[in-house]
């Protein structure tokens, strides 16, 4: 099983997250096409959460007073960005330290390797993810220094 398949299997069905479930969420998109993915309380300031949206893993971040959504798979080796460390509006992948701007999905480490970004909103205590605002690259691999050396 590849890393992408592993990451897809780690998540619960559509509209559910790995966080606490505080009751049923709306199952149908709202009038603007946004899908309910979780409760507002699931993502505290400076934190993230990962949710399934339309068969894709999406990482939501509450950073610097805003709520942002990007693709969860790092453009380097599919590391889970939703589990990365957040500093301001930048998340660092927990695998090999590639950095991304959570507001846009732009990759700081390699500007040609952005991840997807999504419309997101919060209403009535529910987190909603909408259409994809920016496509992410499908390219993977590249340089990294993980501190190991080959002999």
Image (spheres, rainbow, N blue to C red):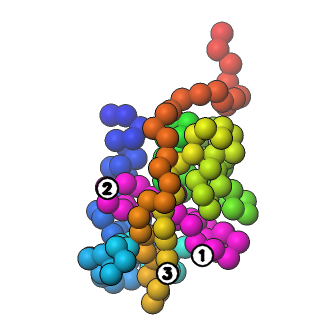
Q: Which residue is mark 3?
A: 122
Q: Is residue 66 magenta?
A: yes
Q: Earlier in the sequence, mark 1 or mark 3?
A: 1
Residue 144 at what x, y percent from top left?
66, 30
Question: Of discs 1 and 2, which sits in the foreground?
Answer: 2
Q: Residue at x 34, y 73 (%)?
A: 33
On the rendered structure, is 104 left or right of 23? right
Which range of residues does the magenta coloring cover? 44-70
Q: Residue at x 34, y 41 (%)?
A: 5
The reply to whether callout 1 and callout 2 are in contact (CB within 8 Å) is no
Assign the C terminus to one quadrant of the image.
top right
Magenta segment's dominant SS is strand
Q: Which residue is tagged 1?
A: 44
Q: For mark 1, does the 10 Å Cα neighbourhood hold few (<14), some (14 to 19), or many (20 or more) residues?
A: few
Which is nearer the N-term, disc 2 or disc 3? 2
76 vs 82: above or below = above
- Asked whether residue 52 is in view, the answer is yes
Q: CA distance from mark 2 to mark 3?
A: 21 Å
Front residue (pair 127, 11):
127
Q: Residue at x 40, y 47 (%)?
A: 7
Q: Label 2 neighbourhood size at 10 Å, few (<14), some (14-19), many (20+)?
A: few
Residue at numbered disc 2: 55
Farthest residue toward the left? 28
Is residue 49 in view from this perspective? no
Q: Quadrant of residue 58?
A: bottom left
In the displayed structure, would residue 142 be above or below residue 64?
above
């Amino acid at each position: 099983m590849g890393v992408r398949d592993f990451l897809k299997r780690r998540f619960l069905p559509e509209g559910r997250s790995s966080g606490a479930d505080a009751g049923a969420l709306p199952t149908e998109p709202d009038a603007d096409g946004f899908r309910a993915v979780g409760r507002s309380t699931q993502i505290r300031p400076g934190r993230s959460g990962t949710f399934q949206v339309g068969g894709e893993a999406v990482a939501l971040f509450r950073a610097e007073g805003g709520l942002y959504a990007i693709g969860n798979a790092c453009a380097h080796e599919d590391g889970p960005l939703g589990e990365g460390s957040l500093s301001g509006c930048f998340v660092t992948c927990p695998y090999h330290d590639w950095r991304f701007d959570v507001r846009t999905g732009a990759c700081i480490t390699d500007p040609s390797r952005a991840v997807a970004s999504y419309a997101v909103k919060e209403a009535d205590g529910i987190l909603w993810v909408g259409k994809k605002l920016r496509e992410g690259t499908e390219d993977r691999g590249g340089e990294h220094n993980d501190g190991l050396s080959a002999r």
